[in-house]
Amino acid sequence: MGRSIGVLATSQLWAGIVDGGALGTVKVYPGPGVPHIDLKALPAGAIITILRDQVRALAAEGPIESVGAGFPGVISGGVILESPNLGQLKGLRLADELRAALQAGGIDVPVVAINNADALAAGIAATRQSIDQLVRVWHLGDGIGYGRHPHNEGVWEAGHMVVTLDPKERYCGCGGVGHLEGIMGHRAMRLRFLDLEPEEVFAAARQGEPRAAEFFKLWHRALAAGTANSIHLDGPGRFFIAGPNAEFVDLRLLGEYLQDMVKMSPLQGSYFQIVPTSHDMALIGAAVASRAK
Ligand SMILES: [Zn+2]
């Protein structure tokens, strides 16, 4: 196994050296102790420049064979076709542009771009279990990411699955009605509870405040519904949960709701597991995915 660099966009930009399946030096933008910068406010060209500088700094440690970039949204053939939570990247030829920027600085290696949740799934597969086993992961952040390993051709925007027919459910970042992300996404929760941050909503739910407690159930039922839909299409198995809002998940409640939604006997036996170090996993997965098969 070789030495590659994984790059990742979440609410920050990350880059890390991956040697075999092990993560080495990691760069993050904005770095620790620096004021938060909303990536939505950075033009695509500025993001490419930051990534280029991160990769250059890491490649100075020794030769690399490839770069893999994990970004949110619908990505096909190295191009970001749609990215609801980083809208300025729509249409960006991410793989080509990053490759050209690196080439100009003397680093001539293949660059691959994949969905960041797929990178996370690939990283979990590479580090936690045999790489040929099915891995599915929900990433609970500003948006709701869904990653699958092995990668399947297609769109797989499961965070935008319709999980309710209530026409009032319209908080999704993509504008669609009834979507999972419209209930679970961080941005969607802020729109729903204009006077409370999501952390405060979860705290209020624990105190038994009725509106927050009701939403807490809805939030878990939505994730159970998305998972049940995946099980009915792709079969049962292990579902990983990652991202900043994974800490609010009550696994027991989630499991109960899932049991209510999946009744056919061959589809039984799924379970959930929290992934605490999702940045590391996604950097590893992006790097591993960029290597020649
Ligand atoms: Zn949506």
Image: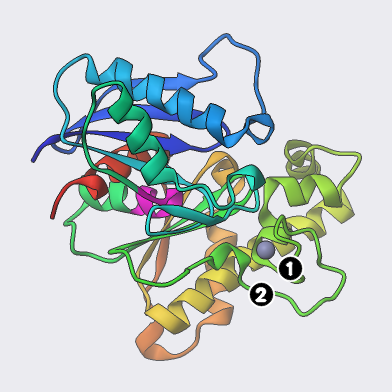
- Is residue 142 in view? no
Which mark is drawn over residue 176? 1
Apparent side of residue 161 relative to residue 63 in the rendered image (left or right): right
Tell me which segment is drawn in magenta.
113-121
Viewed as shown, does residue 289 lie left or right of 36?
left
Q: Percent x, y for residue 33?
A: 57, 9
Q: Is residue 120 magenta?
A: yes
Question: Can residue 83 be seen here?
Answer: yes
- Which label was assigned to residue 162? 2
Mark 1, ligand 1, within 8 Å: the answer is yes
Q: Dots 2 and 1: beta carbons under 8 Å?
A: yes
Q: Position of residue 137 (x, y in %)?
A: 43, 57
Q: Which amino acid type is shown beneath numbered disc 2?
A: Val
The local secondary structure at tag 1 comes to loop
Q: Quadrant of residue 69?
A: top left
Rendered position, 63 above or below 136:
above
- Residue 152 at x, y percent in the picture: 34, 70
Characterize the local packing of mark 1: few (<14), some (14-19) or many (20 or more) Cα atoms within 10 angstroms.
Answer: some
Farthest residue, direction front? 104
Q: Quadrant of ligand 1?
A: bottom right
Q: Residue at x 63, y 30 (%)?
A: 42
Residue visible at 32% across and 44% down in the picture: 286
Q: Is residue 184 left or right of residue 228?
A: right
Q: Nearer the viewer, residue 140 or 2?
A: 2
Residue that extends furthest to the left in the rendered view of this protein: 1
Q: Nearer the viewer, residue 22 or 57?
A: 57
Which residue sits at x=66%, y=59%? 181
> Is the residue 286 above or below the residue 240 in the image?
above
